[in-house]
Image: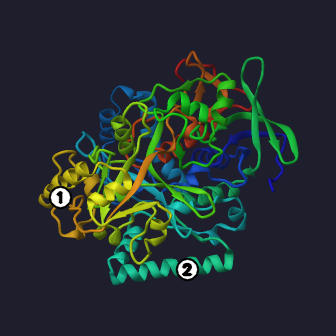
Amino acid sequence: MPTSAPATTDVIIVGSGAGGLSAAVTAAQGGLRVTVLERAEVCGGATAWSGGWMWVPGNHLARADGVDEDPAAFRAYLAAVLGDDLDEERVDAFLDSAPQMARFFHDNTALAFTPGAKICDIYGDLPGAGTGHRSLAPAPVNLRELGPDVGRLLRRQLYETSFLGLGIMAGPDLAGFLAAARGDARGLAHAVRRVTRHIADLAFYRRGQQLVNGTALVGRLLRAALDFGVTIRTSSTVTNIVRNDEDRVLGVEVTTPFGKERLHAERGVVLAAGGFPHDRERRRAHFPTGPDHNSLAPVTADGAGIDLGQAAGGRLRTDLASPAAWCPVSLVPYRSGRTGVFPHIMDRAKPGSIGVLRNGRRFVNEANGYHDYVTAMIAASSDGDQPEAWQIADARFVRRYPLGMAKPRPVPLLPYLRNGYLKRGRTLAELAHACGIDAAGLQSTVAYFNERARQGHDPEFGRGSTPFNRYGGDRSTGFPNPSLAPIEKGPFYAVRVVPGSFGTFAGLATDAHARVLDDDDKAIAGLYAVGCDQASVMGGHYPAGGINLGPAMVFGWIAGMDLLELPRGGSRVNQVGG
């Protein structure tokens, strides 16, 4: 049940993902009265279902590990990746503020971080690319430590990215589970300990208590927000932005289970409602895949925040390299009739698996970023055809690694074979027939790939040539390149992969202070946008893992700091471009 809120507050946040909660905590820690309005019954949005990693170059944990990079390297890397889509003012604001944001939350809140010491930037051959220490994740935490008030508000882990609801964190945690699949004693002990605790939590508390990834990030942010007196109201749908005759934002109109009301905001409103991945009409207009799309965001990310911003005079930016943060996904049929959406984040990079089109040919460096995989899939699809690919692997692979939703041993493959999610063939030709793939094309592709994989290189797509590729591989196979291994031991397996997304890149135009801009590039007084409601500072590119949550947290902090500087009921003089 939502808690009551005063008719007047200082700041109203629309949405409760990373960006919204970052702004809320920052403003509240500075002494402002803050109200978060969340449309769903629980908080966290797409953040709660994410991996929780944030790209935060120059962070204090890197320096603590003795890594003190020149910020010019960060900018050089982004300039190389973004090219003509580089927004210098906003990129500089992000890079300058990222370390400050991380330090602020570390010093003042319940949000503790763990470093991504070995997580590399994706394009390792470009100037300024990093080989670690630029990423942060929330430190794992037990839900009981955060308190029952957080437990009531927190969205649960996405089932498809968990093991029976147990979240698994990239790094040593995931490595332990994969080692268990190989029969490693330490890995088995780690997996048994984690799973046993999870089963006990389900028995005693009816939900998992070991928070990692996005649930840990949202849980810690919620604890910080509540500690600073933030009012959090769920099941509260904002229907209108209220403005005065000078177009300054004064507050919102909101519909709750108890009726409609108007809330006044002395300093401003922050839109953080999750972008538009579930807005069918905007997908039809802006997605190259058309209106049919499978997003990993909750269904409430349907463009409501964008609608509010545009109605208040804001401008929707669609002139980015990509309208969305793509991710290859597979569709999981359940006996209940529900279809799950599984993101192919880790399996593509493991040695012994490739992605092919219906003609049996590869089309991408599978070990590069998930965004690149879908971009290449779309580019390779014929006009009028829905893009699709098949991730192919052999028996050796599926014993050691997940293939989509199908888990490695000792978890049985039979349920995924029975429901048709996983295809199998004794030979490559038989597998091709089961999938509708050209058999001759697949056999030729695999034969060519196998010969080169044994030699440790991929002349077609350069797989395994960058630190990012090699980090995502496996050095224990005995083959010369940790990203490459032949596909030769039958039976053979495949999963159908289609375009999906984590969220949208297209969003409201904003300046370096996260203020929403109108058609004349003037800041709308009292209106901010962060997270996926804000047009991506990366210009529609995906230079590193965590470039959704990193900027969401940073621009949320920037918005909160900007709101702290405003007089009550006042505003700065509008400036062109901020």
The answer to which of marks 2 and 1 sits earlier in the sequence is 2
Residue 550 in percent (x, y) is at 47, 46
Residue 140 in percent (x, y) is at 51, 66
Q: Which residue is mark 2?
A: 197
Q: Secondary structure at mark 1?
A: helix
Quarter of the image for residue 64 reads bottom left
Q: Is residue 3 above or below residue 475?
A: above
Residue at image position (46%, 62%) is: 405
Nearest the viewer among 52 and 389 is 389
Q: Which residue is mark 1?
A: 450
Q: Is residue 208 left or right of residue 406?
A: right
Quarter of the image for residue 153 reads bottom right
Residue at image position (34%, 84%) is: 185
Residue 271 in percent (x, y) is at 64, 37
Q: Are marks 2 and 1 in contact (CB under 8 Å)?
A: no
Disc 2 crowd, CA 10 A, few/some/many (<14, 14-19, 20+): some
Question: Which residue of the protein is positioned furthest toward the right in this rendering?
Answer: 258
Q: Is residue 240 above or below residue 351?
A: above
Identify the disc placed on residue 404.
Answer: none
- Visible in this render: residue 511? no
Question: Which residue of the protein is positioned furthest toward the left in this rendering?
Answer: 455
Q: Is residue 85 above or below residue 462?
A: above
Task: Please name which of the two marks, 2 or 1, marks the residue nearer to the observer.
Answer: 1
Quarter of the image for residue 158 reads bottom right
Q: Amino acid at mark 2?
A: Arg
Name the quadrant of the C terminus. top right
Residue at image position (40%, 49%) is: 545
Nearest the viewer among 395 and 517 is 395
Q: Is residue 83 left or right of residue 517?
A: left
